Amino acid sequence: MGAPRIGRVLLALLFLLGLLAAAPRDEGLGIVGDFVLTERSGRSVSKADLLGKIWIASFEFVRCTQGCPQISATLAQLQSELAPYPDVRLVTFTVDPEHDRPEELREYARHYHADPERWLFLTGDEKTIYQLLENSFHLPVQKNTASDPGNAVLHSPKLVLVDRHGRIRGYFDGRPDPNSPDPERDHQLNLRKLKAQIAALEYDAWYLPSDFPRFNATLNAVTAMLLVLGYAAIRRRLVRLHIACMLMALGLSVLFLLSYGYYHAVIKHGLTTSFAEQTSHANPPAWVGLVYQGVLWTHTPLAGIIAPLAVITAFLGLTGRLQRHVRLARWTLPIWLYVAITGVMVYWMLYRLYPLP
């Protein structure tokens, strides 16, 4: 196999890596229109003040007894759990601005221990707020004058996730659904989806993968293909192709370690994703969890072993110590291939076998 053919094979593999790793970035569900409203502190807050921040919009009113206390309790939970993300804001819009003046909102916010820098409460002109809900957030709002004060305004309990550019990225339930078979479990699942999307938005940039787990699994998959191709090449005495494949596999493994470390240390702040928590909505059979644990418990220690082993094996080959290189490669190759394949299996079982609804 000549150099041009080798180059074509490797370019094809790199193209496959880019194709598999690419995930279209969500362009949003609409853009929030401009607004200028009054915060509980008395200062003005506009859409421009929130640009560059990730924020969660909620819609409540102080006298509400039909779900608002549950929405506020949800936001209080999120305020605590999203503390590691400094650019996230909670923004509560009152739907009863005639009654909810800044002083009423201050007292309401105090009851939920709302951080004035992280959780904003906005009031203002009723027409402006109602148009904002209907035209920008696409949510219904209507006065219910025949009702008691606790149900004076009919409005949506949804939370709306907005990105740094003012684009709506998703709608999430702000309170447990009373019609659900297991309201609290489903509500916490809903919040996990919200927090996962926030984690992705917090570090969203053109030069970073839009889906780190998928990107990392793709690195493992292409590494496995390169290892198989490299082994087949050396069996046919195609030394240059063998060297090229193995060095690329080593480079992708290094990239995987960097990507995996960045994702868990920076984006997830050291938090792990457990199989039981990730699949709790599906109630998988117990044996599936045992298979996952078996794969993970063998993958993890071998992944730690293969890093120095692969480097030493490559070094021996590149420096001409071929006998020692071959002896060590007989151990390195199967371990490396197992780690790469089980890395894909871990991703598939964790994120694709029982995907979040």
Image (tube, rainbow, N blue to C red):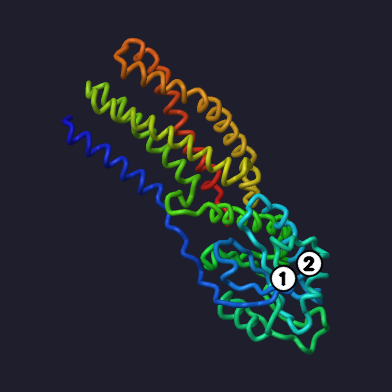
Q: Which of 106 and 9 is in front in this view?
A: 106
Query: Three-letter amino acid code at disc 2?
Result: Ala
Kindly give the residue lying farthest to the front in the view shown. Answer: 43
Residue 116: x %, y % from top left: 73, 63
Residue on which disc 1 sits = 121
Q: Nearer the viewer, residue 283 or 149?
A: 149
- Report the side of 286 relative to 215 (left or right): right
Tell me the CA gap for discs 1 and 2.
Answer: 8 Å
Q: Which residue is drawn at 47% across and 25% down?
A: 307
Within 10 angstroms of label 2, few (less than 14), some, or many (20 or more) residues?
Answer: many
Residue on which disc 2 sits = 109
Q: Indicate the quadrant containing the N terminus: top left, top right, bottom left or bottom right.
A: top left
Q: Are marks 1 and 2 in contact (CB under 8 Å)?
A: yes
Residue 30: x %, y % from top left: 51, 72
**Kind of element beneath mark 2:** helix
State whether residue 291 is above or below residue 214.
above
Residue 345: x %, y % from top left: 49, 38
Write down the quadrant of residue 173 in the picture: bottom right
